Structure formats: C-alpha cells, structure tokens
Amino acid sequence: MARGDVHTMPKGSATRTDRSLLAGWNARRVMRSLGGAVVVVFLVSLIAFALAYLSPTDAAIRSFSGVGISPTEEQLAAKRAELGLDQPFIVQYVNWVANIFQGDLGTSYRTKAPVAEMLFEAIPYTLVLSFTSILLTLVIAIPLGLVCAARRGSVLDQVMRFVTYLFNSLPSFFVALLLLYVLSVRLHLFGVMATRDLAGILMPTLALALPLSAWFARQVRAYAIEQLGSGYVEGLRARGVSETRILWVHVLRNLCVPLLTLVGVSLGMLLGGSAIVESIFNWPGVGLAAIEAVGHRDYPFIGAYALSMAVIYLIVNALVDGSYRLLDPRVASAYAEAGAGGDRDA
C-alpha cells in the first residue's frame, strides 16, 4: 500500500460486522434478562414459601379440616412426616421447588383440590379481563388524547382534562362500586353478580378501564403535543399535508412505542391489582381466588399465586421489550450502541 493511502473496509464487510456485533450483543442481553428473571422468580418463591413456613397455621391440622376428623397427636405427627414438615426449612423449600418443576404446586387447604388445577382454571379469566380492559382503555384513550392535543387550550380540552384528572384519582374498586350502584341497582341494566359471558365481563372491564383510560389519555395528550411541535410535523405542514393526516397517521404512528410501554406496565398492574374488582363482581379470576385463599389462610395457593403472577409479569415485560425492536428498529440500534459502549467501558 502506498504511503498516504487510506485503508477502508468494504461496505459489505462493515455491514456484516455490524450485524454480527448486534447479534452478539442481543445474545448477551437475552442472557442477562434471563439471569435477572431467574433471580426475581427465586426471590419471589423464597419469600412466598418463607411466609407460609413462618405462619402460625399448622398445615397438618389444616389438612384434616373439613373432613369431620379430630386428629390425635400420632395422626398429626404422621401427617407432618408425610408432608415433610418435620424437616429443616431449606430441605422443605428445595422439595417444594422440585415439586413445582414436576407440576405439583401442592394441595389447597380450603378446597382440597390441587393448586395447579385451581390456577389453570382461574388464570384465563383474569387474563381475559386484563386484555379486554387494556383494549377498551386504548379505544377510549387514544382518540381522546389526540383530540385534546389537537385542540389544546380549548373548552373541550379543559373539560376532558378535568374528567381525566377526576377518574385518574379514583381507585378501581370505587369505580366498580359506583357502576354496580348505577347500572345494576338503579338502572337494572346488569345483574349484581358477573356472569361468565360478554354481559358479565362488561362491568368489571369498565371498572378497570375507566381509571386506566384517564391516565392513558393524559399520557397520549402529552406525547401528541410534543410530536405536534417537532420539526418533522412542520415539514409535513410545509408540504401541504392535512392536519387530520398528520395527527391520525404520522403522530399516532410515532406514539406506538410509548403506548407499548404503557400497555406493558398496565398489564402487570391489572394482573396483580384486579383482585378487589373481581371480588366485587364475583368474577371467577385468580384475584378472587387469592382473596378467598387469604381469608382461609390457604398458604399453598397464596404462594403459588404470587409465583405465577411474577412469572406472567416477567413474560409480559419480555414480550414488550421484544416488541420495541419490531415497532422501531432504531430502538435495537440504540440498545446495541449502548451495549457496545458499556462493553468498551468495562
């Protein structure tokens, strides 16, 4: 090579190198995420089991409840040995985890049924309620937030901001009681107790979606106002693009990633926080079962409930994190650059 010549890497080689670096960093990121998820699940399982272990309730005595038997001390000792309650804490915990990997979550003190069957029966109802609430929230919040952003400062904007502040300050259980009184007691539009059909899921969905849609609408309004003041919107206006198309096509498209973040956070909140609403409407979800388990000190179910909610929440977060890259490839590039910079610093 002559002196002064500059050696440049071929464009194809550079692209292949970038792709290999991105793939390698993504693999490392997946491994780190899996490691973090394992730690979280381990801590949740340890805390859930420790609470059951330290509770004053004797599992051997509870196992005889409801069968009309007054056990003797010999029977209780035999039952404790059968359940492994006479072993040290760490041995009991390891056995419990080993049984979980075999699909055995224990037996409910309250119903005497396998906890796994109870969870598999109840979790779909909570998932359906959570997803329908999110869907209704998006249907309400996106148009409301965009219209308020487009008419910022107008009377409509002021009224809608007041309404969203009001509903955002109301807890879901209060909205549930209000809906129950108005729609069921006063107007007789729905039954007091929820049924397992479309009509039965409507009121619990409204109770969860109305406060959540108020929060979503405020966030959508803020994001949309920021987008409407950006440079690319000014460029679109200069080219003669209508305000309607700018708002409902370009601005809405750029709101997908922030909305996905809100959906991910909200799904986790709904999965773990819909128990009171399920109890009010007698919706047969896992939240209602958890409240009943707490009332009966059904620790096998409580521990399995906490563990299953943690796993579902981690799965939802992983799906949201992966969806970022599908909706906006720039997110993956930014992550890769940040990861490469962190590796160099290390």
Image (tube, rainbow, N blue to C red):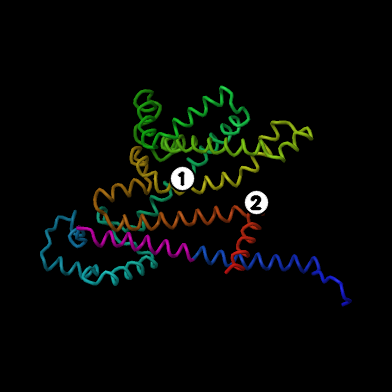
Report the front residue among 72 and 97: 97
- Given the image, on which type of amino acid does mark 1 rest? Val
Residue found 49% across the figure and 44% down from its top: 131
x then y, percent, for residue 331: 63, 54
Q: Secondary structure at mark 1?
A: helix
Q: Is residue 230 above or below residue 162?
A: below
Question: Which quadrant of the structure image shows residue 48?
Answer: bottom left
Chief secondary structure of the magenta portion: helix
Up-down relation of residue 50 to residue 297 (above or below): below
**Mark 2 closeness class: few <14, some 14–19, many ≥20 residues within 10 Å:** few
Q: Amino acid at mark 2?
A: Asp
In which quadrant of the rendered image does the N terminus lie? bottom right
Q: Nearer the viewer, residue 307 or 223?
A: 223
Q: Could you tell me residue 38's position as x and y percent?
A: 44, 65
Label 1: how many Cα within 10 Å (few below 14, some 14–19, many 20+): some
Disc number lying in front (1 or 2): 2
Labelled pair 1, 2 in contact (Cβ < 8 Å):
no
Please report the residue visible at 19 percent of the width from the left and 60 percent of the height from the top: 58
Image coordinates of residue 216 in percent, x first then y, are: 52, 38
Residue 298 lies in what quarter of the image? bottom left
Label 1 – label 2 distance at C-alpha = 28 Å
Residue indicated by mark 2:
328
Residue range in magenta is 35-56
Residue with the most extreme front position: 4
Q: Which mark is residue 128?
A: 1
Which of the two labelled residues, at mark 1 and mark 2, occupies the earlier sequence position?
1
Q: Residue at x 37, y 49 (%)?
A: 286
- Secondary structure found at label 2: loop
User: Is 53 part of what is drawn in magenta?
Assistant: yes
**Would you say residue 151 sits in the magenta stretch?**
no
